[in-house]
Amino acid sequence: MYLTKEKKEEIFAQYGKSAKDTGSAEGQIALFTYRIQHLTELMKKNKKDQVSERALVGLVGKRRRMLDYLKKEDIERYRAIIKQLNLRK
C-alpha cells in the first residue's frame, strides 16, 4: 500500500499544525498532492485505466476547491502552501 498511516502522519506533521491535525487546509492539500502524484505515475504506466483516471480527476478537483477556499480565507497561507508544494499558479 502506497499510503500508510505513518506516511499520512508525516505529511500532516510537515504541512499541518501537528501530526494529528488532519482537518487543516494545508494538510489536506498536501495529502491530495501526494495522492495525485501517485496516481499520475500509475497513469503513465496504465494509460487505459479509467478508474484511476476518474479518481485522479476527482482529486485534482478537490485540491482546486480547497486551494480556492484557502485563497479566499487567507491569501498568505495560500501563497505559503503553493510555494511549499511547488504548485503552479
Image (cartoon, rainbow, N blue to C red):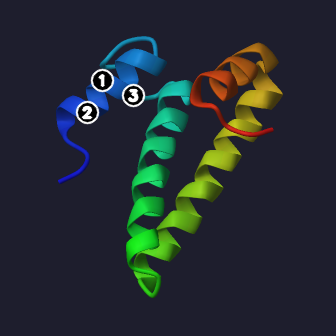
Q: How crowded is mark 3: few (under 14 residues within 10 Å), some or many (20 or more)?
A: some
The location of residue 30, given as percent across then percent down, is 50, 34
86 sits left or right of 73 in the view? left
Q: Can residue 21 be seen in this view?
A: no
Q: What element carries label 2?
A: helix
| Lower position in the chain sequence, tag 2 or tag 3 | 2
Quadrant the C terminus occupies: top right
Q: Can residue 37 be seen in this view?
A: yes
Residue drawn at the location 25% of the way across and 33% of the way down: 7
Dot in front, 2 or 3: 2
Q: Which residue, given by chain and number where applicable, does mark 3 sit on? A: 22
At label 2, which amino acid type do we have?
Lys
Q: Is mark 3 on a helix, strand or loop?
A: loop
In this rendering, the answer to whether 76 lies above or below 65 is above
Q: Which residue sits furthest front? A: 45
Q: What element carries label 1?
A: helix
On residue 7, the disc is: 2
In this rendering, the answer to whether 36 lies above or below 86 is below
| Lower position in the chain sequence, tag 1 or tag 3 | 1
Q: How crowded is mark 2: few (under 14 residues within 10 Å), some or many (20 or more)?
A: few
Q: Which residue, given by chain and number where applicable, does mark 1 sit on? A: 10
At label 3, which amino acid type do we have?
Thr
